[in-house]
């Protein structure tokens, strides 16, 4: 052994210094004085001047020889600095009128304009003058109610719903190429006319062509592009012809199922045509006004039309162009085409007369009575309603004329005609009479247009309009087709206010064109948005549910239930909700829901609304009839609902110990856990793991620790596929042990000792089931620390041995998952291994050594050194292994102290167990000598590896060892010689960082007291 070379009484080469840890802590604490002056502080110069003035005043005040004049001068300087400080703080608190702040203020003030607020904040001068054009404001209609649904949203829904698999018959002129070309303009008119005659003669022999829906839509989109291209090329006649052709297609109702989608696509083209004509006339007026202003050289002439311009503001040349367009429109012979084109150009009436648009709308509304096909007529009325919304801000009544709503007349016409067709059982409609479509489907096709018309009539949400429309419904129509749209089109507050009356009206409905459950559903949607008065809420529910509970069709029943479950959850207690769910279960047991996608959608929506609308989730989860409803869901829907429920429960941030709630929550957690398989994405696994972990954290049985441990045992059995959950369970069990320690103040009795041992056994058994090597290592160390705190030394030793035995099994490279993706990347494991082993070594300082001679006080450290030698990346010399040995040298310097730097209460560490034992000291000397020898070998091996930056790394490590020797070892000839050699080894590297480190090391040596240190500094400074 190395100790044999040093006879008794001779100075040992590696003797650690004895340290006074308590005194060092006090010294460090005293040196941490709070300073008021720092270069990074705000207003550094101001604070410095103030401190200087305070110091001067205090010095003069304490000096008895100072004159009163000097004291007064110092006090004035101090007052001056205080004044400067207050002025700066006042300036700092002043608010600057920046644009962002003004925009935020404008956003908070209804109707405020950020630009006007900015301009008003600027200074004004009386000398500045501005010309202002006085344009009278046009009277606008009242704003629409908040439940108003714009046509854009409806049109998207129409395109998705109304499709066809049949081929669409179209005439040949629809398929002809309408694209324009400037080169053709130069051709002879006679040649062009002859070609047209030949084509017309050839087309007479052709029949209609059949297109698929996709081909038809593509051609309509091509027509839209052709219209824009023709307009850009200045071919106005061709543009009008395309618009007329599109309007003509709207008169064809041979395929009613596709008609709503066709209407949406074609009216989009017509609206584009109307916008192009409007912009053309407006541009012509502005060009003419600009030419006049240039000719007269006057700056007072307005050259731009404002948004709310009047007919008097328009130039006569633009009015002439506008009249020409209307003359062309009047020449269209067919009623449908003429009406659609005229409606597309409706806004252009603003260029002619201010009060002409309303009269035109009323005239067109009457003209629509001439369209015989009810489908075509209803959608034409819907287009009139759409254009009314577009031009509504500019509607003015003529003198002596009232500002009336033309859509109300079109709705009256519809009710009158619908009553006629209903009485004749729709036999006059070809599609229904031939059996190609049922009455219910035909009414469903009419629904989008009718709903839009009624919505426009009731857009202001006035009570008078509401009752007028209801009266017209009773007098003329009395059909559920109209009633269902009245319920859904008016604002919810108005419908809810008169819910009792509407319930009776639904009950009195005579026809079944729209089933009564759909009427109740429409009413329920409004009741959910705005609850009715409290005194009638229950009576309305009872009245509706007398009818709803008798519904045999499960689809209709769930359609109503999906809406009213939200109404009950928002306005009633969990008792009423539980009764309602019981009725739902009774109906669902009569039907097979697994194969019905629509029914599963209703059921999923119902459970989602319960979760979103309930007042107390804990009471809902504890209801007897809630989980049975969830069990009716399909697998994917059940997983989605389970996630939503658990997320809401976690968001409450409340703990629970209710066994019913806990059982329900873990049933839901098992649902999402069982959906995980080998093909599940990594991000999905993380989300599920985080959700289950959050649920586990919300369960707390208080002081009943055994019950909590039993819960964690059940969780371990239930959630086996997720490492994050298993990791959390081990951590939770460790917290149970800590809680038991706190309850008993560290003094365990027989019962609590058995409980702690059971928890540690749980952890020891569970940790090996994890996949990640470092997850296991960290948990082993954590559990060992918890065991030592509770004075379970043998259990802690077993956990540490498991950790040490696992170190050689850690691979050189480990895979790391990236959050948000399934991509994995490799990285070296030694970057995590080094800090872990050093952390483990620091814990071994306070862990008691083995009393037997065979094992000794350092048997765990010895095992750690053996394990490190077998760790794959450290089988050869490297930087991280050298850093490890440096850390272990510091560890054994701490082992040599008479009293360790830290202890665990009620646990005797090696300083108490072995003290000044001779065998203990010999073992320390032996390990210290061995570690320093290995460290020097590692330093030599780092350079031999010839890796990039090896010399710089060797220099840094050499300086690390120098600092360790200076700080922790007693200096003698051998240790001092080694310090000098190591320092000179580092001095051969010229890198800036290494040079700075050398200088700081030299300063550290100079601060040491003693002849050995002085000699070392002298040697270090000599070249």
Image: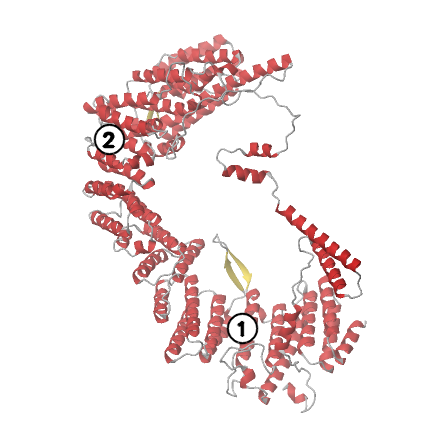
**Residue 911 rendering spot, x and y as whole percentages:** 56, 83
Q: Please give the residue where the numbered disc 2 appears in the rendered image.
A: 480
Q: Residue at x 73, y 64 (%)?
A: 996
Quadrant position of the N terminus in the picture: bottom right
| Front residue of this view, candidates 629 and 975 | 629
Earlier sequence position, callout 2 versus callout 1: 2
The picture quadrant where one finds residue 424 is top left
Q: How is the image coloured?
A: secondary structure
Of circles 2 and 1, which is in front?
A: 2
What kind of element bears circle 2?
helix
- The circle drawn on residue 840 is 1
What kind of element bears circle 1?
helix
* 588 is higher (above) or lower (below) than 391: below
Check contact, mark 2 vs mark 1: CB within 8 A: no
* 602 is higher (above) or lower (below) than 742: above
| Front residue of this view, candidates 301 and 929 | 301
Q: Residue furthest front?
A: 68
The picture quadrant where one finds residue 380 is top left
Per the model, the C-alpha gap separating discs 2 and 1 is 78 Å
* 43 is higher (above) or lower (below) than 411: below
The answer to whether residue 728 is seen in the rendering is yes
The answer to whether residue 679 is seen in the rendering is no
Quadrant position of the C terminus in the picture: bottom right
Q: Mark 2, residues whose alpha carbon is within 10 Å: few (<14), some, or many (≥20)? A: many
Residue 204 lies left or right of residue 735; in this view the side is: left
**Residue 190 rendering spot, x and y as whole percentages:** 48, 7
């Amino acid at each position: 052994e190395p100790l044999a070379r040093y006879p008794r009484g001779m100075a040992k080469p590696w003797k650690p210094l004895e340290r006074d840890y308590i005194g060092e802590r006090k010294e460090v604490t005293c040196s941490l004085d709070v300073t008021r002056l720092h270069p990074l502080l705000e207003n550094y110069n101001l604070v410095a001047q103030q401190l200087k003035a305070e110091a001067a005043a205090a010095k003069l005040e304490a000096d008895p020889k100072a004159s009163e004049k000097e004291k007064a001068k110092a006090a004035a300087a101090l007052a001056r600095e205080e004044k400067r400080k207050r002025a700066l703080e006042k300036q700092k608190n002043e608010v600057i009128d920046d644009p962002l702040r003004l925009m935020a203020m404008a956003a908070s003030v209804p109707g405020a304009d950020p630009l006007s607020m900015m301009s008003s904040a600027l200074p004004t001068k009386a000398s500045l003058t501005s010309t202002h054009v006085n344009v009278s404001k046009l009277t606008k209609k009242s704003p629409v109610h908040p439940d108003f649904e714009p046509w854009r949203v409806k049109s998207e829904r129409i395109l998705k719903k109304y499709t066809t698999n049949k081929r669409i018959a179209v005439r040949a002129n629809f398929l002809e190429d309408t694209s324009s070309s400037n080169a053709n303009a130069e051709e002879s008119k006679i040649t062009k006319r002859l070609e047209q005659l030949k084509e017309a003669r050839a087309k007479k022999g052709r029949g209609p062509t059949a297109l698929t829906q996709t081909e038809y839509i593509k051609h309509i989109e091509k027509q839209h592009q052709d219209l824009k291209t023709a307009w850009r090329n200045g071919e106005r006649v061709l543009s009008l012809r395309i618009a007329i052709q599109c309007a003509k297609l709207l008169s064809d109702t041979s395929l009613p199922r596709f008609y709503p989608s066709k209407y949406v696509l074609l009216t989009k083209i017509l609206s584009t045509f109307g916008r192009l004509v409007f912009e053309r006339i407006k541009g012509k007026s502005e060009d003419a006004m600009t030419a006049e202003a240039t000719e007269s050289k006057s700056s007072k002439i307005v050259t731009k039309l404002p948004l709310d311009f009047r007919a008097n503001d328009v130039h006569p040349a633009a009015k002439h162009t506008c009249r020409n367009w209307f003359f062309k429109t009047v020449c269209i012979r067919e009623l449908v085409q003429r009406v659609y084109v005229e409606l597309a150009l409706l806004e252009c009436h603003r260029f002619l007369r201010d009060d002409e648009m309303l009269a035109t709308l009323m005239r067109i509304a009457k003209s629509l009575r001439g369209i015989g096909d009810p489908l075509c007529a209803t959608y034409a009325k819907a287009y009139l309603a759409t254009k009314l919304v577009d031009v509504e801000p500019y509607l003015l009544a003529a003198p002596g004329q009232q500002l009336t709503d033309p859509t109300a007349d079109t709705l009256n016409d519809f009710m009158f005609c619908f009553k006629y067709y209903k009485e004749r059982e729709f036999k006059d409609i070809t599609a229904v009479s031939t059996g190609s479509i049922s009455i219910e489907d035909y009414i469903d096709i009419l629904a989008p247009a009718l709903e839009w018309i009624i919505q426009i009539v009731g857009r202001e949400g006035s009570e008078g309009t509401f009752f007028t429309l209801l009266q017209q419904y009773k007098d003329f129509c009395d059909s559920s087709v109209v009633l269902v749209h009245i319920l859904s089109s008016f604002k919810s507050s108005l419908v809810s206010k008169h819910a009792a009356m509407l319930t009776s009206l639904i009950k009195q409905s005579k026809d079944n064109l729209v089933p009564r459950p759909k009427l109740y559903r429409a009413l329920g949607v409004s009741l959910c948005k705005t609850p009715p008065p409290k005194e009638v809420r229950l009576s309305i529910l009872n009245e509706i549910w007398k009818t709803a509970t008798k519904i045999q069709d499960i689809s209709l029943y769930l359609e109503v239930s999906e809406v009213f479950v939200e109404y009950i959850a928002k306005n009633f207690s969990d008792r009423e909700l539980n009764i309602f769910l019981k009725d739902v279960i009774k109906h669902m047991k009569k039907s097979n829901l697994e194969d019905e996608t629509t029914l599963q959608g209703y059921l999923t929506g119902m459970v989602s609304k319960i979760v979103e609308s309930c007042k107390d989730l804990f009471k809902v989860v504890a209801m007897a009839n809630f989980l049975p409803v969830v069990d009716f869901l399909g697998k994917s829907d059940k997983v989605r609902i389970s996630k939503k429920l658990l997320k809401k429960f976690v968001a409450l941030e409340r703990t629970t110990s209710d066994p019913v709630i806990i059982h329900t929550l873990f049933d839901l957690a098992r649902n999402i856990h069982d959906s995980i398989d080998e093909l599940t994405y990594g991000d999905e696994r993380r989300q599920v793991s985080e959700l289950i972990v959050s649920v586990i954290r919300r369960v707390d049985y208080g002081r009943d620790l055994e019950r909590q441990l039993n819960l964690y045992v059940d969780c371990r059995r239930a959630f086996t596929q997720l490492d994050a959950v298993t990791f959390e369970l081990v951590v939770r069990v460790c917290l149970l042990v800590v809680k038991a320690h706190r309850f008993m103040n560290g003094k365990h009795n027989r019962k609590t000792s058995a409980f702690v041992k059971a928890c540690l056994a749980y952890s020891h058994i569970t940790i090996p089931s994890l996949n990640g090597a470092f997850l296991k290592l960290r948990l082993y160390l954590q559990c060992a620390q918890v065991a030592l705190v509770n004075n379970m030394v043998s259990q802690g030793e077993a956990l540490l041995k498991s950790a040490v035995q696992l170190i050689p099994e850690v691979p050189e490279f480990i895979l790391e998952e990236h959050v948000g993706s399934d991509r994995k990347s490799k990285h070296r494991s030694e970057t995590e291994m080094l800090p872990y082993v050093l952390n483990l070594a620091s814990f071994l300082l306070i862990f008691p050594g083995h009393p037997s001679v065979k094992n000794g006080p350092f048997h765990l450290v010895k095992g750690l050194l053996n394990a490190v030698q077998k760790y794959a990346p450290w089988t050869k010399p490297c930087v991280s292994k050298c850093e490890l040995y440096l850390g272990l040298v510091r560890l054994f310097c701490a082992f040599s102290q008479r009293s360790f730097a830290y202890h665990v209460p009620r646990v005797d560490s090696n300083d108490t167990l072995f003290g000044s034992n001779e065998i203990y000291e010999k073992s320390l000397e032996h390990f210290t000598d061995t570690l320093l020898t290995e460290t020097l070998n590692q330093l030599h091996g780092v350079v031999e590896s010839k890796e990039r930056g090896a010399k710089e790394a060797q220099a840094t490590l050499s300086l690390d060892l120098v600092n360790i020797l200076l700080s922790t070892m007693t200096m003698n000839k051998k240790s001092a010689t080694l310090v000098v050699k190591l320092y000179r080894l580092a001095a051969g590297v010229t890198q800036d960082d290494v040079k700075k480190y050398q200088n700081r090391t030299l300063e550290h040596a100079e601060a040491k007291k003693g002849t050995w240190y002085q000699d070392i500094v002298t040697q270090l400074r000599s070249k």
